[in-house]
Amino acid sequence: MSGRQDRGGRGRGGSRGGGRGGFPSGELPFRPSRGGHEGRGGRGPGGRGDSRGRGDFRGRGDSRGRGGFRGGFGGGGDRGPDIFTPAGGIPVPDPNVRKTEDAIEKAALSKIPSKGLFPSRPGFGTRGRAVELYANYFELSTAAKKDLFRYNVETLADKDKGTRTPSARIKRQIIKLLLEQHFRPHRDKIATDYKSNLISSVKFPQDQKTYNVEYREDDEDPSEPSRRSYRVRVQFTGSLMLSTLLNYLTSTNASAMLNNEPKNEILQALNIVMGHNPKTQTDITSVGSNKHFALSQGLVEKAGLGGGLEVLRGFFVSVRAATARLLVNVQVKHVACIQGNRLDRVIQAYGDENGRNTFRLEHFLKRVRVRVTHLKDKKGREARRIKTIDALASRGDGQGLPHPPRVERHGAGPENVRFFLERPGETGQYISVAEWFRRQYNITVASGIPVVNVGTRQKPSYLPADVCVVEPGQPASSKLTPTQTQNMIRFAVRRPAQNASSIVTNGARVLGVTPQINNTLANFGLNPVPNLITVPGRVLDGPVVYYNNNKSVTPQGANWNMKAIRFSNPARLPSWAWLYIDARNSNPAQGPFQDTLKAFHAKLQELGIQVGPLVSGLRIGLAGNDQADETEIERAIDQSMAKKPVLLLVVLRGRDTKIYNHVKLTCDVRKGVLNVCVVANKFIKERNDQYFANVGLKINLKLGGRNQSLQDSRLGIIGEGKTMVVGIDVTHPSPDSARNAPSVAGMVASVDRFLAQWPADIRIQQGRKEMVVYLDSMLKSRLRLWARHNKNAYPENILVYRDGVSEGQYSIVLKDELPLLKKACEELYPASDSKKGLPRISIIIVGKRHHTRFYPTKKEEADRSMNPQNGTVVDRGVTEARNWDFFLQAHTALQGTARPAHYFTVYDEVFNAKQPKAPFENTADILEDLTHNMCYLFGRATKAVSICPPAYYADLVCERARCYLSRLFDATPQATPAGSVVEGGGVGQMPDSSDVLIHANVRDAMFYI
């Protein structure tokens, strides 16, 4: 089960030849040319491999591309300091911020508490032991009276010249040239995102003007005339006054308002200015809009991942609004990139990790930029030329040419790729790529490494991998293998103090803040102070956890164990069966497995589950053919269910994602079988008590039991039995998914006051659409289930924890999703309840992909991994006093830097309807305490988890849906009659709602756990 990494977008730009005649740029054309060509990354015809689409490539190379750990701050093993301690000691939290927060709180409490849309903060939390923490923010001082001027940049298509809309990479170069050719006197007073925006500290004389930009690539000779140009329109779109935002943030008037639109526009402009310097530097690569990774020897921090990939350490940067000030959030980030190495070595390393399928290799290399090394300038130095790989050499290349190339097979080597060579006064002839390089450049190239096409399918241009070097810092688009994921984690996981040190040293340097501030920031009057701020926090006490017969356990460090303890409400397992899925021709000993089954049976009984007899057992061997294996698995599951066991224990030979996915699809969707999967090498071994117990946690939940519980008083309004808690999440296709892969929405909801059982509903919708389309019908299904468990009564309160929504989408939740929730209630609740204003609904956004981190300032206030202690809550210092949000780290991180969850209340009818009672001073205390306590009720673990269970369970539901749709979500490249296509098994298969329709037999169980 491999991990997924956060990656930014990639440009599609083509390559361009540099010669004025003959053979441009040293590439291999198929007819005489007077100039260069553009590569567009098309998918033309061509190519076939063997019967399974493999092709073959072999070659030499003394590197497997794995590399060692490099860079400072403990990459890969250096423990570093326990606690981050800056020079000059621990700074105190800014007293002016505290003063403004207190004034806003006092003014707000003097008014009637607001409810409904974006309710105001009902006070700051008061409970818990006070601590001071570092936060990964720089304070940003500004020239308050400085105005920003915003301009839109548009590249105009020229129909007469056939100019097309440029790619993202070409547009970036156009904007760079626009500033060089037309705005040179104002360069340090202009910032750009290199997409469509210019931000200037001075106003241009004209509100709109069209410029002619002479286009050239960075590697082209500036003394030669440009062969193409673009018309670019620059249009003034408005002034942005920093003073407006600063006055709002520093105002102590609780009713002060600043609409989100102007506020977000100012922050967007400041982010463009902050990110301009790193985006302009050639030794820094930027991923997306605000992640920057150094490439220069003095700053680069990287390690090899294997398989032709490497990981870079860099920094996420974002300007944020907070009470009384502006802040710059700086967080350590990591990105998996194609290794900056000779291309033949990258290909060899890829094959070592992933096998020799040339269609997969082509997918891996598509749109990768390479620098050619065989060309020389007039002084004999390497002539820098950058090309973009479109494909591997294929039999379908250049079919429209008079003399198309002759390619023996897809991904053929230079001896087996021949092109037609024509020279004036000579008879044309076919020549191999290898022979051309021997004659023309006196270079002998490796015979077994695939030739790459840096042209197009229609007009190919071939290069051997030996003369190409991958440009560093290009994010990989493919999913990491398990080995690469482990290497990534090994490099990325560091002690909190190491990350804090990186931020104030390398992070500040990448931003151009130290050793001296860059000219752009200085001209805009922006001065980030490269020191971490400190903020006040509080450590909440965790609850006592209860089990069967009211036996209690007091967690230590948010962890506990279940020795000599039975589940709070054990389930019954009248009968069960096992299915062992092994490799074909495997002949394992029967004795150890039978002993394991007996020990497992005993452990389930010890946990309190009433276990009946095993009714069947079956071992099958798979051959490794996907289609045949799927058929065999379905047949075996049918056979195992002949005596109708309540649960099927599936033992897998290893962590095989395809087999696991098919087991879940067959059992959950097609057959309706409660099932649990275990891995053989973990399940069948001595002293396996803990593993058995963990599996028992899942089984009890699937059977409808309750693993642990809390006192009603620790669950507030939920403990009264009239509040249903709902979790909602959406998962989207990854970059290497099929084009027609949908997004999947998952909803879970509690069925009673114990918060133990959370049945789920799943729906598919348009790909990459975040808002849940079928929310009304999904909620109605959960409300009906609640009524079945609560004497046909619907809940008075519905508390929604909505996962996966970015800050920019908060208002869309209220605009699109809240009406659907209310519609569902209107259709089910009796008129008498509606007249009472029931149900009351509250919506809290759960953020786990944010970039805020906290670090302890004192060792005695840190946990064992030197993170803040579990239960740490922060609602001051980095928040806005008028918003109702808080950060909560409920868990203890095993390693690395703990990430707190961020909770933001966007709608409230529940909490402000009740008066706080002791020990709570205000409603903020109630919500923080309730959310924290719920984190101890995640049934699959004996520890507090990092996000509250409704959001966590909804995320698991979406991940399970990805198993059912793996043919679309994990599409793999394969051969087709038209050539190689990066789509895989999902090509032509449209998703259908039945693909995720859980079988009626298990629909109301926690099948996904």
Image: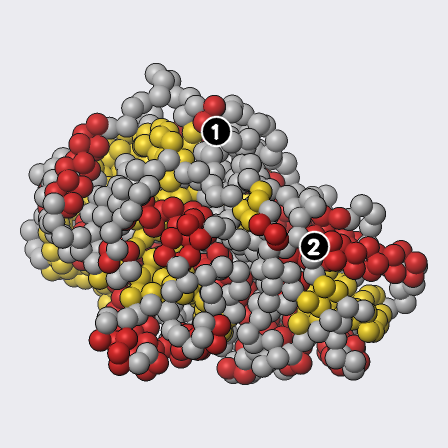
Near-viewer residue (105 or 517) = 105
Q: Which mark is residue 825?
A: none
Q: Position of residue 212 (x, y in %)?
A: 21, 59
The answer to whether residue 246 is visible is no
Which quadrant holds the N terminus?
A: bottom right
Q: Is residue 260 above or below residue 416?
A: above
Q: Is residue 153 above or below residue 61?
A: below
Name the residue rendered at 29%, 66% in the picture.
840
Name the residue rendered at 26%, 81% in the picture.
831
The residue at which mark 1 appears reads as 862
The answer to whether residue 721 is visible is yes
Near-viewer residue (640 or 767) = 640
Name the residue rendered at 66%, 72% in the picture.
674
Instruction: Name the N-terminal-most of marks 1 and 2.
Output: 2
Q: Is residue 436 above or below residue 573?
A: above
Near-viewer residue (285 or 949) = 949
**Which quadrant holds residue 253?**
top left
Left or right: where 597 falls relative to 824: right
Name the residue rendered at 43%, 77% in the picture.
792
Q: Position of residue 795 (x, y in %)?
A: 37, 69
Q: Nearer the viewer, mark 1 or mark 2?
A: 2
Badge 2: few (under 14), some or many (20 or more) residues near its Cα, within 10 Å?
A: many
Left or right: where 925 falls relative to 559: left
Task: Assign a secondary structure to mark 1.
Answer: loop
Q: Position of residue 80 (x, y in %)?
A: 54, 25
The residue at which mark 2 appears reads as 607
> Which residue type does callout 1 highlight?
Ala
> Which residue type does callout 2 highlight?
Leu
Q: Position of residue 93 (x, y in %)?
A: 28, 28
Left or right: where 505 falls relative to 76: left
Cα distance in 3D space between marks 1 and 2: 34 Å
Name the residue furthest left.
205
